Image (tube, coloured by chain):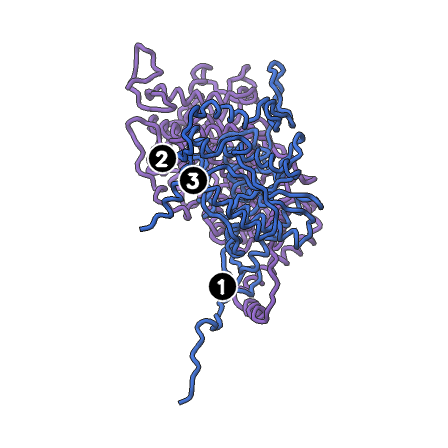
Chain colours: A purple, B blue
Amino acid sequence: MECQRCPVTAKNLATVLSRKEEFCDECFIKFVSTKQRKQMMKDEFFRNLFKVVYPLEDKSSVGKILLPLSLSDSGSLVMLDIVHDLLLEQNKQHNNHMGFTVDILTISTEDNLSIIKQHMKLLVEEKMLELNEISDVYKVHFIDINEFFNKTSSVSNLIIDDGNFEIFARSRSMGNDDRLSLKEILSEYCLSNSSRTDLTSIMKTQLIKHFAFENGNDAILWGHSMTKLSEVIISLVVKGKGSQIATFLDSESFDTLDNKPCNYKNLYPMKDLLSVEIESFLQVRDMTKFLINIEEANSKPNCLISKKPTSSINQQKLIKNMTINEITTKYFQDIQNDYSNIISTVLRTADKLAEPKPTITKTSQCQICQSKIYTNPSNWLDRITVTSPYPRETSEEEHLFKQWQDSKLGQSHTHYVMLLNEIKKDSINNDDDSNNNDMKLCYGCLILLNTSIKDKNLVWPRVNTMSSLVNPTNEDKELSGILNQFEINSDVEE
Amino acid sequence: MSFTAPSDPVNRPVKVKISQLCELCHSRKAFIKRPKNLSKLCKQCFCLVFETEIHNTIMANNLFQRGERIAVGASGGKDSTVLAHMLKLLNDRYDYGIEIVLLSIDEGIVGYRDDSLATVKRNQQQYGLPLEIFSFKDLYDWTMDEIVSVAGIRNSCTYCGVFRRQSLDRGAAKLGISHVVTGHNADDMAETVLMNILRGDVARLEKSTAIITQSSGSPIKRSKPFKYSYQKEIVLYAHYMKLDYFSTECTYAPEAFRGTAREYMKNLEAIRPSCIVDIIQSGENLALKAKKSNAKKSVVKFVDGNRCTKCGYLSSNSVCKACMLLEGLEKSRAQVAIENDTSADGAAKNLRALEKLSF
């Protein structure tokens, strides 16, 4: 089988079959790169951000992008590779000058930090060093996910009234001894895998956005493929967060954080690429070695002609042990063969969505996921859910009720009611909080708290008090610091 | 020897464990896990909660006006049977002051619709409500069995859907009723929201969750009081209330792609039961971007209240969908037919015949 893109005189052997077309390695790499670059040049803002602007002395025209890199996700790695190629090209064409700098941000946990650093070292040696010798293009940053709790000075204690779904919040400042960690939050409060995944992903997104804000980046480049974006869109719908789709996909406006305008925009450069294409690209470029979970990467579906994926671990998982995201991924994998156009249709449809018109007088921000709130979620849920019981009629029923009150179950309910009353009282008395009447949670987070969190009660950092994610003392020497750590020869240091 | 009375196995008092008590009243034994949120409820609490939620939906959306005549689209299936029962019950309990009429459509599916219509007729007796039946044969001169024999089984839902929708409106108009109530439930609603996104049906995206649909050109409005009611709860309620309904699915195959969305929702429901109302909440908050004006293109704009040039029914195009489908059907109608031919009677009849076989 021959590549359909090569010139007739020099046909190479096809290695990839994608969108009914056969490609050789080289043509496939070009195909994927072009798709990504097209998105990176989609409007004037991004064109100016990435191109080399003359006169070269004007340093303010050099774009500063943030690339959140996850070494367990192929998307961001492929994106980095294509961005790197663009930089190499600019460097060659513009005589050692490049149009933008890249801050690479990796979020780690205590468990995987050492392995991430090992793999990052490999990546730095193979890719970044070469360009950094010319100018400081790359900076590598690591953030521990627990910084989400460490860098905030106060937390909210959120609770839902199980009678009318009203939300109450009590804030308290954090001392050094009562710091929370991701592990504690997930094990103490979460009742399901889905809520654990959702809260972790919210934390990561918040950290990345706050980092970009503090670090003065012009854009965040997210590594979502078309497939991944469609999955996220459907997951948002399923989790009752449909109103957030338009903001999530928005790459035209500057982002906002806690109602404050930011100087960066969000971009999804891989939105024209299917996940099978990204997986294949990684294999073709022999980049799976950088991933920390090579086996999992090899089991993902690809569109290579000769190399088929190994059997997946997820296929053996029972539905009840899966998260909403995993079920959605499985759904898209299942229908991909019979209804191949669904993925692009979902994304195209979602791109046509706008923010809904608010039905409340003042919009506010969700205290958990920071998204805008357009309707009163408690009222909506209360209207469609009745929680008052059928009255007790017989003496036997009275007797059983009394027994229940005295039992452990009754007492644990009493404990919940006491906690609720305590937070309610503090929340109402707290006159300093001018936002007391604002909506506190979006519908999706209200449901999360109501159905998957123990005692409907969660302690969550107040994101508006988060600071010092970017440490000013080592900012300029970030990369060199890491390079030292990786024991790379001192020639490359500034 | 003294006489010891034997223990009474039937009336022996049952000891209820505390953990088995209803999570709302904490005083009666729980009988079901509520599908909507998996809370354990007793029969009394479940029925009260289910009825009150529907009453709340009716009141919050101001569905009925005092003195209004309402036609309940009755198929004999669980949704419409519970709907008829519920509206009568709530009308008596909360004094809505409405007059309820059962309105049935006979699509002409031998072995399916004739059986379910018998159920509707029994319901009419049980609830003491007037019943009117309109048939596809009378309105369009086609039965569904005939349509399937001409157009094939794959498109059956398209024809049936278009004709049934129009028939309900025509039937209501004939009875002088301007409000048709249907038994669409939360599962149907959520499925529609998902399908519209998956298929990219932008035109229907914003309005798909409306509880009342109305057009300025039509005197007939439609509403869905079960918009937030789970299908499983409707079945449980029908079971507890011992309602008489017809439980067989239509034998003409449902659309294959819809099946995949249904399966997906079933899986989601297993891990988060609230997902059905969550999808509806999302659907209510989907809004489209304003279209960029394109001065060069002269696009025929959709006009609300436009009429079909052939039959005069409400239509967004010059000829309504039903007339378009009918025209296609007429072209394929057999010129010569065998007298008393029953071969057009569809799969449902064969299935019924097979069910009655015994060895």
Instruction: Please name the amino acid that badge 1 sits on.
Output: Gln
Q: Residue furthest top?
A: A9
Residue A202 visible (yes or no): no
Q: Nearer the viewer, residue A99 or A311?
A: A311
Q: Nearer the viewer, residue B177 or A407?
A: B177
Quadrant in the rendering for residue A57: top right
The residue that label 3 is drawn on is B251
Residue B339 x/y as whole percent: 42, 31
> With B266 as the anchor, is B88 left or right in this view?
right
Residue B4 x/y as whole percent: 43, 84
Query: Looking at the figure, which quarter contains the N terminus of chain A?
Result: top left
Q: Are marks 1 and 2 on the same chain?
A: no
- Taking A216 as reference, is A166 above or below it? below
- Taking B170 as reference, is B267 above or below it? below
Residue A6 x/y as whole percent: 34, 14
Measured in 3D between alpha carbons, the distance from the residue under mark 2 to the one under mark 3, in whole angstroms, is 39 Å
Instruction: Please name the amino acid that badge 2 sits on.
Output: Lys
The residue that label 2 is drawn on is A300
Kindly identify which numbered label has been placed on residue A165. Answer: none
Instruction: Please name the amino acid that badge 3 sits on.
Output: Thr
Q: Residue furthest bottom?
A: B1
- Taking A264 as reference, is A47 above or below it? above
Near mark 2 (Cα within 10 A), the count class, few <14, some 14-19 or many ≥20, is some
Kindly identify which numbered label has been placed on residue B20. Answer: 1
The chain ID associated with circle 1 is: B
Q: Secondary structure at mark 2?
A: loop
